[in-house]
Each structure stands twice: as structure tokens, then as C-alpha cells.
Image (cartoon, rainbow, N blue to C red):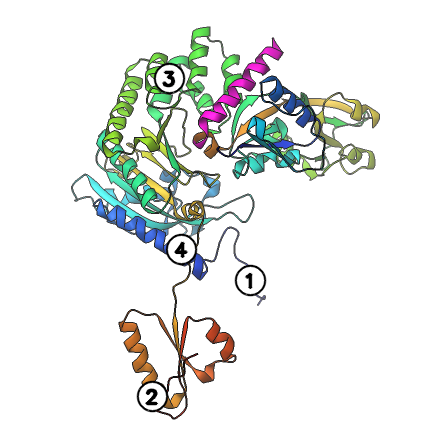
Amino acid sequence: MSTPFMFEKPVGMRDTLPSFYQTKNTVKQTMEKVIESWGYLPIQTPALEYYDTVGMASAILDRQLFKLLDQNGNTLVLRPDMTAPIARVAASSLKDQMFPLRLSYHSSLFRAQQREGGRPAEFEQVGVELVGDGTSSADGEVIALMVETLKESGLDDFQIAIGHIGYVNALLLDVVGSEERANVLRRYLYEKNYVGFKQHVKSLPLSSIDEKRLMDLLSLRGGREKLEDAKTLVSNGEASKALEDLEQLWEVLDGYGVSHHIKLDLNLVMHMSYYTGVVFEGYGSRLGVPLSSGGRYDELLQRFNRPAQATGFGIRLDLLVEALGQTEALPEQTCILFSKERRLEAIEKARQLRKEGKRVVLQDLQGVDNIDELSKAFADVQYYIGNKQGGKIDE
Amino acid sequence: MSEPLTMAMPKGRIFDEAADLLREAGFPLPPEFDDSRKLIVDVPEADLRFILAKPMDVPTYVEHGVADLGVAGKDTMIEEARDVYEVLDLKISECYLAVAALPDYKKTDINPKVASKYPNLATQYFKEQGEQVEIIKLNGSIELAPLVGLADRIVDIVSTGRTLRENGLVELETIVPITSRLIVNPVSYRMKDVRIDNLIERLAKVVEEEEA
């Protein structure tokens, strides 16, 4: 047998030590409380799913999936996102439940990292899915809930960018005429390569008006007024509907009083190919990468034979804690050191203190090498040592 | 007063050219940055802070958000494939990537080897050509590889072609033209949108005028 690697972990896997765990847990509980107060019911799904169902539907790049085989040779994946599993549940185990369904989750997700081993390949995400409601009210509710969740968790300086896949698709298709050519342009947007986008547009045989329409797409970022600019670029049915969606969504967000956190960004094209309508991303000022994202996916559920409109968001817990930038101090603990003659007394004392809500460590003196060092680690140490009754030596 | 915009810049010639562009765009930069050993240069008058980095590392600083913006060659952008916005072609330090070899080079079927500072890019290029090669990563002086028999071809940056000529190498194929790009961190692009858009706009105007 070969010697196991003593300290090594697979690439991207991390240990969470007590102080970080404490911080993360507090943030998580705060978030869950907010989400549950909006009537979302938490669920859990398995870490392993079939590649053919959830793996394919999830639209995470294939090379980012952790795959393995079960005893029968079926390919399994460690879930790379929660939207696809929840869509599966909504269409199967919950198929008799009436729509709209409001579900929430807190789960670890797995995505293989190819670069820089330090990046997490397993991370926790907290999120919601609102299934079976296609209204702008639903989009608005999900975004407003995300804002409130971030705010309650203690994040103050953050912003949400909102885009619409339908608008981008309608504009690109209207100008270049074929889905294939639109795809090339969409890819540049997704890769955030505006230079490449502009160069490609210039290389196309377009009228100067059409060329300008595509170039102007890149500047559709800002406040609500950009919706007016967007209207001038394309006016077919799909685009007008998208802009109407956004117009209504803005009303809803105004109603929730959160629109000051919102910016329009009609270039926002997400990597998740199942998004069909409104998409959004959240950013915190102390973090270089987006910490939350979400959007409308009206075609995902029909892959599981229960067609339904749906929307949701996910917040990366590890990134949120990083953006908050503070670790919480570990709670204070009391230590009761005892020798075996006075064990009963010590147990009774511990029981009493725990009832009062204290955290109590009960430690046999014989199990300790260095009493001085041990006592330094506790806020309060009580001794039940020797034959004397009731003797308590305070430091 | 808000925090200055932070810009990651490659040391050396590209820095000077980019600084010229910023001056022309109306940013009051000092005529010369005297202490070249400094790694962080603050220019409060222009509300800018520069981080001086290895050219290959500029996209990394920007991706992680310690720099809001950066100036990076298209070569490093292709090689590093970082998640940043590439917003403007600055059209400075123009050059191109090329395949080069000794003049008597003949295609071999026996395990052809290519040396490069850009292993990802080179791998991608030869894959697209349908050619099977072994890529050897070097960190500099790539021209040495064919001279000593480490590889029979190299993939490297060519600006005037002088280095190749001096080492007796000839160009075989051009891969892609290269210029420096202005890149932006995705979060800064949203959180500091007004200031960043303003900077992009002013630079874009200068670049356009230079071209005309």
C-alpha cells in the first residue's frame, strides 16, 4: 500500500477552520432568516446527480464538471449549480404541488478549477428559485430579496447590474440576420471582449446605420433613462417585449425601494445558457469578482417535462464573507478542570452553567499536559480538584 | 475625495506610450516618472494610481480587482484568458505573433517541437492548424531554442524583425497582429462606472485622432 498524502487535498478543496466557520455560519443564518421570512421553503438535493439529466441541463462548461461512474457505469456529476437540480425536483418530486413554488437552498457546489490551484472548486451558495411565475413582479421579488439578503448580511456598498437576454438576442438577430452570425457577436460579449466585438462589427458588410446600432449596444449602461436609448436601436416584437419587461421591473424595484442599488447593463450576457430573460449580477466594492447572480430561465423546466417560467438568484457565501472583510471572534468558553474524585460536582456545575447558556468545556486534569497553556485559552477557568469540598480556586 | 482609480501598467516602453496617451487625453501626469524603481506611483492631480507590473501579470492584477484598469498586450490577453473587460484598442506597441525557424528548416514528422513564451496560445494555434507539435515553454530568449536544437520552430512576438535577423532566423507564418489594450475589472466597471467610462471615452478620442 502506498503512503497516503498526509497534508494534501485535491486541487481547489479547502478546510474551514473554526473562526472562519463561525463567521460564515452567522452570515448564512442571517441570510436564511431573511429568505425564510419571504416565504421560501428550504430544500436539499443530493450532491451527486446523473450527468445526462442535471449535468447537461446545468450549462456549466463540461470541463468544469467533476464526473465519476456509478457501479452500473452511469456517468454522475457533483452538482455544479442548484438551479438545474431544483428544476428537476419541481418537475418530479414536487410535480403535484401547485405553482408558483418558492424554494430556497444552502448547498455546496462543485466546479473544477484549471488555473491557480488555490481557487475553490467547492463553494457554498445560498439562493432561491421562484418557479411557475412569469411576471415582472416575480423578477422584482427575487432581485429585491437578493438586495435585502445582502444588506442584512452586513454588506453596505454593493450594486446590481440588470440586463435582458431577449433584448440582446433581438438586436443582434435584427442586424445580422442569422442566428449563427449573432452567436459570434454574443460570444464576444460573453467573453467581455469589446475590442473584438467592434473589430468584428467593422468587418461585417453592414450599412453605417446598422454598424452604429451594434456599437451603441456597448454604451447601454447606466440608469433607467438608457431604456429610452435602447428603444431607438431596435423595435421588433421581441425587443419591445424585453424593454417592457425591464420597464415594469424597474417599477417593481422602485416599489420595493431598492432601485438605487440597480444599474442597467444591456450587454450583460451570462455564461449560463439557460437564461432567457432578465439576468443580473451583484457586485461588492471590496471584491474583484461578482458575488451573486441570477435571472429568468423559462425553458429549463420543459427539459424535465413540466414547462414553467422561473427565476432565481444565488449568492456565493465564501465571496460574500470575503467582501464583508471581517471575521467574527470565537464565542467565549468556560473550562471546568476536575480531578476524578470530584467528577460528579464538576458535571453538576457544567450542567448548571450550560443551562444558563454558557459554553462549557469539561476537562479531566489527567488528560492535560500543560495546565497553564490550557487555562490561557479560556475566558474563565474553574477548578474542581483534590478532596476538599466546594473549594473553587479562582485565578 | 474618493479613492483614485488604480491602473496596472507594464514597465518599460509600453508604460511611456500609454502615459503619453493619458497626457493627450488631458490627465495631468508629470512629464517624467523619475524614480523607475518605484512599484506604485500616485498621481493625485489626475486622481490616478499606477501599479508597475510585469507585462504578463497585468491581467492578473486587474482580474483580482487590486487594479481597476490595466494596459495589456493582446498577446498576454490571449495567453492568460483572464475574466476582464477588454474595452479599447490603444493601438500602441504594435507588433505581431509569428512562427519562426532557421532558414534551412524543413518540416519533420518526427515529433516536431516548438518553443514559446506563450504555451497556451501556441498550443491553440497549432491545434487549429491541425498540426501535432510538442510545445516547450521558455521564459525569454526564445531565439536560442532553434540555435541549440531545443526546438525546430519558435512562436514569438515580432515588432521590427531585428532580433530574428540578428539570430539568423526567418519568419514562416504570421499568427495574429498585436496591440496594447485597455482592460477593466468587471466589478470596477460597474461600481466606478462613471469615472471609468469617462476615462475610456477620453482615451478613445485620442486614439481615434491619432489614427486619422
Asked if residue B199 is among those painted magenta in the image, a careful observer would answer yes
* Distance between the alpha carbons at the discs numbered 2 and 4: 38 Å
Q: Earlier in the sequence, mark 2 or mark 1?
A: 1
User: Dot 3: what SS?
Assistant: helix
Q: Position of A363 compared to A255: left or right?
A: right
Residue type marked 4:
Thr
Q: Residue at x 52, y 22 (%)?
A: B200
* Distance between the alpha carbons at the discs numbered 1 and 3: 53 Å
Which of pointers 4 and 3 indicates the residue nearer the eye? Answer: 4
Q: Which residue is mark 4?
A: A23
User: Dot 2: what SS?
Assistant: loop
Report whether mark 2 lies on the same chain as mark 3.
yes
Report whether mark 2 lies on the same chain as mark 1.
yes
Q: Residue at x 36, y 55 (%)?
A: A25
Q: Residue at x 50, y 12 (%)?
A: A204
Q: Which residue is mark 2?
A: A390
Report crowding for label 3: few under 14, some 14 to 19, many 20 or more residues within 10 A (C-alpha).
Answer: many
The chain ID associated with circle 2 is A
Asked if residue A182 is among those painted magenta in the image, a careful observer would answer no
Asked if the residue under mark 3 is in contact with the one under mark 4, i.e. CB atoms within 8 Å, the reply is no
Q: Earlier in the sequence, mark 1 or mark 3?
A: 1
* Distance between the alpha carbons at the discs numbered 1 and 4: 25 Å
Asked if the residue under mark 3 is in contact with the one under mark 2, i.e. CB atoms within 8 Å, the reply is no
Q: Nearer the viewer, residue B172 or B119?
A: B119
Bounds of the magenta segment: B191-212
Q: Quadrant of residue B112?
A: top right
The chain ID associated with circle 4 is A
The chain ID associated with circle 3 is A
* Distance between the alpha carbons at the discs numbered 2 and 1: 46 Å
* Distance between the alpha carbons at the discs numbered 2 and 3: 83 Å
Residue type marked 1:
Phe
